Amino acid sequence: MLKVIEAWGVDHMYGYPGGSFNSTMNALDIEKERMRYIQIRHEQVGALAAAADAKLTGKIGVTFGSAGPGATNLLTGLYDAREDHAPVLALIGQVPHTNMNYNYFQEFDENPMFADVAAYARLVMTPESLPYIVDKAIREAYKHRGVAVVVIPNDFGYVQIPDELYSSVSPTDQKDRPLPQPTDLEVDAVLEMVKAAKRPVFHVGRGIRDNGAKLVELSKKLQIPITVTGQAKGLIPDDYEGNLGMLNRASSKAADEIFAVSDLVIAIGADFPFANAIYRTHPFKFVQVDVDEAQFGRHHYLDKGVWSDAGDFVDKMLVRSTDAEPSSFFQAAVADMQNWQAYLDHLLDRETSPLEFEQIYREINKIANDDAIYSIDVGDNIINSFRYLKLTPKNKWVISALFASMGSGVPGALAAQLSFPDRQVFHIAGDGAFSMVMQDLITEKKYDLPIINIITSNASLNFIKSEQDDIPMNHSGIFIEDQDFAMIARGMGVEAVTVRASSDLPAAFAKALEVTQAGRPFLIDAKITDKRGIPVEELELKQQDGTWVETVNPSYNANRALTHISSVQEFFAEYDGGELKSLPEIFAEHNVPTDK
Ligand SMILES: CC(=O)OP(=O)(O)O
């Protein structure tokens, strides 16, 4: 079985031993020169790390757990893999087959539990079939870009079977999966819709893969601004003027505003989890380009569906289109983004004591190598990283995007550093998320993984606090005890500092560089305030008497006893955004026609 897994190019797997997995532990010891066993301290971390391996490399990640709790602990990570379409193989221990179905210690019928999360889940019935079943499981995980589970009765791992390498080579292994192609007719129809539109916008997902440069060319050629889903962050260079960034809560002001006034949205390879809330409330025409024919119509009713690979669609659009006239709408979108970027830069440039979160990003951007990898845990750090991390297609980053599992940051960083040992790895997590997996800081130490861990610690589940503010309701259950994470790290043998003011950051990051360049992990416990970043999703744009009017969502005021916000200018000022301009102002400056 291990030789089959090795033949698929896997060189490490994550897990924690248990009695029912000892035969495979024995095999791992025999194979230790070729297969590195990474001893994590909780199976959830192993499963999340395997998922992160797959997200970062495109290759299958492998994890294991023993029978009973070892198996159930894997589930969160396996769901994370399924939701983010990451191929993962989970090996599950089972009691010896002679004890199965007797309610033996730690025994339970494991397959039903995995039936939902796994595209393929099998109990091995004979020792001889084990290599084949594992090979088949890997094929199924790749085919479905999901989870495959193989349950192995412990005694089978001690049986001698013929010592012949199970052949993993098949005609499909070296080929890319054929992808659906757009037709000339489909592309011409989309180009007609673009011509008829006044305010077209691209919404692009990770389906664009490495075709970001081509999309930039198309955006310039057709004068269409680009908005992206979270997972496409970095695939289009952040410094392209027409890249407005993300929609919704994690968004830039420009992306939310421009999307809100669009009359044609062309979604390309975009699996947008908030579509039902965000898309459906806007009355635009909608083109969806997707490789998955089952996704059409999920986001919005379709004016045009194009079953196609994203890159091939962009290629054909480039070939069959002519240059559009310079567009005042496009220029206004660019100006809106520049105004937003200037606001972010202004916040980055301040010095703060007590520390606020922006200055941490300023320091990261300063010391990060241009091919650094980021593992970002769930919470405010996702919004802040999307807004403040400067990324290019050379960088890599990993999050628990759709399952949004708190505690994915440490496992993501382990995966990043193990899969890319020569690259700089940052791990950014809130205190709530980190404390769910912090035992595995010791795994960074055990394997000398030089990860820069940054814990943004404010004794608050701040992402949820903002949600409670917006509902509105009293704060409930969101304040957590402050902890001395630097001391905890030192207790695990990881060097660490605590930072309380922005003036402490340069020295802390210099120390982080010194320690990690010497091959050891480092932790910065950054005690930040519970300040909220500007919630631009509270802005609303409406057509009124032939012009655009921008207001703040009335429910924004509901939880405020004293400071009622009555205008967008007051709203901007509340977040130190005195220089921010409303979209109607920017439209006026660029003479954007206001008619529908
Ligand atoms: C989930 C959550 O609220 O995390 P954070 O405090 O890091 O925003």
Image (tube, grey):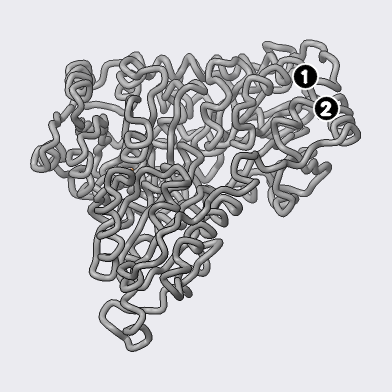
Q: What residue is rendered at 70% in x and 34% in y?
A: 310
The amino acid beneath tag 1 is Leu
Residue 192 on image: x %, y %: 89, 28
Which part of the image, by quadrant, shows the C terminus?
top right
Compared to residue 574, the image places residue 80 above or below, namely below
Residue pushed farthest bottom? Answer: 102
- Which percent across, then down, holds residue 214? 68, 21
Element at label 1: helix
Amino acid carrying mark 2 in the image: Val
Give residue 213's quadrant in the image: top right
Q: Relative to residue 213, is residue 159 drawn left or right?
A: left
What residue is disc 1 on? 222
Taking the image as drawn, is residue 585 in sight?
no
Tag count: 2
Residue 342 to residue 452: above or below: above
Give the crowd class for mark 1: few <14, some 14-19, many >=20 residues within 10 Å. many
Residue 230 x, y percent position in the rendering: 53, 36
Q: Residue at x 53, y 37 (%)?
A: 231
Q: Earlier in the sequence, mark 1 or mark 2?
A: 2
The foreground one among 418 and 309 is: 418
* Ligand 1 within 8 Å, label 1 CB: no
Name the residue tied to disc 2: 194
Q: Quadrant of residue 279 in the image?
A: top right
Q: Quadrant of the N terminus?
A: bottom left
Q: Nearer the viewer, residue 574 or 117?
A: 117
Rendered image quadrant of residue 425: top left
Question: In this orientation, which residue lies closer to the viewer: 532 or 271?
Answer: 271
Cβ–Cβ under 8 Å for marks 1 and 2: yes
